[in-house]
Structure formats: structure tokens, C-alpha cells
């Protein structure tokens, strides 16, 4: 079973995949989120794993924008505790470093440490990629912020563990498979006694109180909302798509009635997937 | 009157400020959004102008996260049509360039052109800053994506105008002043016969149908919602703050009643400002 993810080996996405899938698997790293999505759609990978939301910095817009293409289905999620590490070549010390490379979000999450060390943050494509860069350059004045896995993969020295400003730092990942295609090896079978959630996306009709009416569909059926995210509609400035996560499976009794009700009052609704809620 | 903005001179924020304020003014460029916010709070500038939302890439999270500090008030907004330009040193051609520097969002908005030119995108702090970098280096293999203003300011050659994939590319800016302090020079007086909007932020109580109940406050009073944005609450993973824009001034009749009603059913509500709606 092949899992596509964004970033170099050692990326947080790889750690999430290793934690989510318990059986042996192989990894296919891609440079961009869109390439992961394509790999799943084209069958180059059985599953893709993408970060959708961080508990500090919020939703990852590019991933939401891929989901609207609706050629994949969300079949699972995983919540990963993000522990950032300051990594450098052997011979480097906290005093020798001048520049720190990482993904802008990781740099943003370690602002206090970077300020304290008086080093310049340098944005880079991803965390593991910046670790690779540091390993290849052997420059003692540069460091990277990346995962413990990246330190291991690239033979880097950990100058500091737990670099993040806020320890309540989790990233929620979604697991995708191609829409309409059976998952390999008995994965993603619905299980009894497990909490499910459903993700949908919809566009409002141009009617008064449109969003309020959409949420009433769930409120009157006591279906709990878990998350709402609005994204701009391209070509229609200041109009939005709404991504909604709610409790329950889309084939549960109340949810079976909620969806057609929502369709009545919206321009369109797409079900992105029903899947086990991560603990 | 001094206006703080993020980026180098020639940034889109400067263009927005020039368009919004009609009287003569001076500019104070800052490297980060947070520094602009601080300049306004500390009185180093009379106003700050910050991008809050782009019609293609969506909300600018860092700016939303500054507003929750609630030491400023939104007093206006401006919608700027974003026209990206590919800028390089004199002597450069479309064929000589290999790398293109810009803010990640600008690179993302010009993906088609970058792919077509087969050049490497290099993320940089801001658009105008990347123009400055290109101007200083005089390297014929590098270019920047930035505003027409930046081309002028740094004496760069425009290799290509209107580089953006999608022409419906607008950025909405908000104008801030210090909370509770009178605006200088008669600015920001309420005018009759003008459409106003109000921005608020609130946190839900842990009650069933919480968000639905909050939106009912506006629906039952026929107050139109313009935008909803959720942001994570730091330290409480998977709980959210809601930023809401609605039509009308907070001192209009229906709105005067809506706010206490909302306070009844939420953990907190803050009014971020009532201001003229930009055309």
C-alpha cells in the first residue's frame, strides 16, 4: 500500500502516516499538496495524507481548495502533536547559528525561540526540506526547524527540542482515497461503536439569512457542528464556499434527511466523506 | 498624518493607503503585520492599513489574530485590484531569468506564468522587498513579482504585466486607529446616506446549536451577514473564535439590540469597528 504525502522524507506528514496506518506501507513524497492529490486521483498512490488544520495557525487553505475538485473522498483523519526541533550540522552550537530555515508556519510557531536566539528566520518550502538543505550545506551558521524524524533521516544534531511557543500544537491530517474506488486491504470499512464525522462543502443561494437557514438543517436534528470554514469562490469576489464538519455518518438516520434538506436551500452540496473521528 | 503598513515602499499596502486617504500623508513601512499594529497602539502612526482578505486566496490569518487583542478599532476598508508584474533589472529578458522571488501568496497567484516560463519560484517576505532584492543584486537571472509602484520605486524593468492567473484578484484592506482615540483631521466621522458594515468577534458557549443560535440573532432582525471566519483558540485545540462582518452600523436600531442578545448566548463579544463599506 502506497501513501502519498507532501514534503521530503522526515516531514510531519510522514509521521502522521506512520501513526495512522498500522500495516506496513511505502511512502511517496511529493513537493506540493496538489501533486499528492493528483497521485491519489491518478492511482499512483492508494492513499494521500494532507494536513488540513493546525490548532494554532488554523486551516490550511490550499488543501481545502483541492477538496472542492471532488475527485477524492476523505476516509480518515489523524491528529499529530507537533514537536519542533532546532536541527543543525555536527559542530554547530546555539551560538554559531545565524539563520534558521523552515516552513513559514513552523517559523511562526517558534517565534519566541528565534527572537531569543537573535537569528534570522528564512522561509523554505517545508520543514524536512530545510533539514535536508542544512545537512547538505554543512554550514555551521545555519539551522532548520523540523521533526525528530528529519533529524534521524538527515543525520543532524538536535540543538533544541520542543521549540514551539505553545505546547498545544496539533496538526489534523486527512486521509484521502480516489472517489468511488474501493480501498485496498480492507481499510476504511465502517465499524460499529465508533464515533464518525462527515465533511461537506456547499455554496449558498442568494436568499436572506442563507447561512442561518443552512445551519438550521443541522440544529433542528440535533446534529453537532464541529467546524465551519469559508473559502472564497474564484471569480466571484466576496462570495464564499462553506466547508462544514458535523458529527455522525452521512448514512445515519438524521444525516440522511439533513443532506436533501440542505440541497433544497443551497446552490450545491458535496459530501467529502464520512470517517472515524480521531481521538 | 502618518500611515503604518507592512512591507517595503512600493508594497500593495502603500497603493491601498494612497487610494484610501485622499489628503497628503506620510508612510511608515514595517517588516511585520504585528509591528504595524504596535505602531498604531503606541501612537507612532495615526492609522495602520493591513490586508485582511484576498478574493482568491482568502483571509489573512495573522491579521485576524492581531484584531483579537482589541487595542485598535477598524475605521475603514479599501478594496484594491491586485495587478502583479514580473520585474527584473535592465538587461534581463524573459529568457534570461531562472528564479522568481516574491511573497508566497503572489507566487501562488502567478502559478501559470511561472510554469510556462519554467522558472523556480522563491518565497520571500513581501512583494516589494523581492523587487528591492532584484534591484540591488543586478543579477540578470532573477526577477520579482510585485506592484507597478515597486517597479517605479526601484527602477526595475517590467518584463510582463498582469501576471496573475485570475483577473478577479482583489485584496481588501482594513484601516485601523487606536481604540478610544479620536482620529486626526476629521477623518472617520460618520456620514449620512452611506452604507456601513460592522466587524465583531465572539466565542461560543458550550451549548447545543451554539453557532446556529448566534446567527439567529442577526437573522431574526434581517441583518445581512457579509462574512464569517473561524480562527483557532490558542491552548484549546479544535475550539474556535468567530469573526463576523454584518451590514449596518453598531449604533443602528436593530444592531443596538442584536449585540446584547448575542452577549447573552456567547462567552464574549467584541466590536472591532463600524465603518463605511468599500465599493
Image: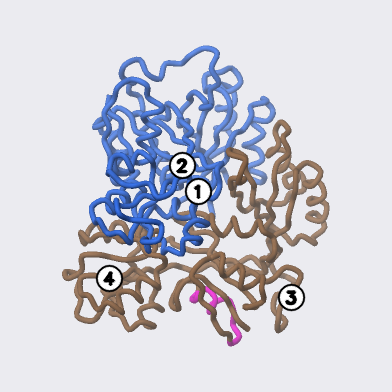
Chain colours: A brown, B blue
Say which label, 1 or 2, has the lower sequence index: 2
Q: How many marks?
A: 4
B207 vs B144, left or right, is: right
Numbered mark located on residue A189 in the image? 3
Tell me whether marks 4 and 2 sit on the same chain.
no
Q: Residue at x 54, y 50 (%)?
A: B165
* Residue A36 image offset from top left, x and y in percent: 57, 70
Disc 4 and disc 1 in contact, CB within 8 angstroms: no
- Which residue is labeled 1 in the image? B164
Q: Which chain does tag 3 point to? A: A
* Residue A35 image offset from top left, x and y in percent: 56, 69
Residue A184 in the image: above or below residue B78: below
Q: Circle 4: is it few (<14), some (14-19), or many (20+) Cα within 10 Å?
A: many
C-alpha distance separating marks 1 and 2: 7 Å
Quadrant location of residue B161? top left
- Which residue is labeled 2 in the image? B83
Q: Pick the quarter of the image with the N terminus of chain B.
A: top left
B55 vs B133, left or right, is: right
Q: Which residues are magenta?
A: A14-24
Most common SS among magenta residues = helix
Q: Residue at x 52, y 28 (%)?
A: B198
Q: Circle 3: is it few (<14), some (14-19), or many (20+) Cα within 10 Å?
A: few
C-alpha distance separating marks 3 and 4: 43 Å
Q: Which mark's residue is nearer the viewer, 4 or 2?
A: 2
| Frontmost residue, B133 versus A56 | B133
Residue B31 in magenta stretch:
no
Numbered mark located on residue A35 in the image? none
- Which residue is labeled 4 in the image? A143
Amino acid at each position: 500500500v502506497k501513501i502519498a504525502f507532501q514534503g521530503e522524507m522526515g516531514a510531519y506528514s510522514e509521521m502522521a502516516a506512520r501513526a495512522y496506518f498500522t500495516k506496513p506501507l511505502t511512502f511517496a513524497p511529493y513537493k506540493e499538496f496538489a501533486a499528492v492529490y493528483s497521485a491519489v486521483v491518478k492511482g499512483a498512490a492508494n492513499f494521500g495524507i494532507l494536513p488540513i488544520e493546525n490548532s494554532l495557525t488554523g486551516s490550511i487553505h490550499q488543501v481545502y481548495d483541492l477538496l472542492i475538485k471532488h475527485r477524492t473522498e476523505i476516509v480518515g483523519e489523524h491528529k499529530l502533536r507537533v514537536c519542533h526541533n532546532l536541527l543543525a550540522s555536527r559542530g554547530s552550537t546555539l551560538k554559531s547559528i545565524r539563520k534558521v530555515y523552515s516552513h513559514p508556519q513552523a517559523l511562526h510557531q517558534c517565534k519566541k525561540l528565534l527572537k531569543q536566539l537573535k537569528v534570522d528566520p528564512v522561509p523554505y518550502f517545508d520543514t524536512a526540506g530545510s533539514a535536508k538543505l542544512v545537512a547538505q550545506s554543512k554550514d555551521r551558521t545555519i539551522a532548520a526547524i523540523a521533526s525528530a524524524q528529519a533529524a534521524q533521516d538527515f543525520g543532524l544534531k538536535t540543538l533544541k527540542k520542543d521549540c514551539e511557543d505553545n505546547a498545544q500544537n496539533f496538526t489534523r491530517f486527512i486521509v484521502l482515497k480516489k472517489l468511488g474506488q474501493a480501498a485496498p486491504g480492507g481499510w476504511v470499512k465502517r465499524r460499529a461503536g465508533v464515533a464518525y464525522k462527515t465533511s461537506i462543502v456547499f455554496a449558498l443561494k442568494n436568499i436572506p439569512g442563507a447561512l442561518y437557514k443552512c445551519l438550521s438543517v443541522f440544529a433542528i436534528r440535533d446534529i453537532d457542528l464541529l467546524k465551519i470554514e469559508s473559502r472564497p469562490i474564484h471569480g466571484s469576489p466576496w462570495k464564499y464556499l462553506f466547508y462544514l464538519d458535523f458529527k455522525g455518518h452521512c448514512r445515519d438516520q438524521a444525516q440522511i434527511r439533513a443532506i436533501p434538506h440542505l440541497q433544497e436551500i443551497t446552490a450545491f452540496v458535496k459530501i467529502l466523506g464520512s470517517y472515524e473521528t480521531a481521538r
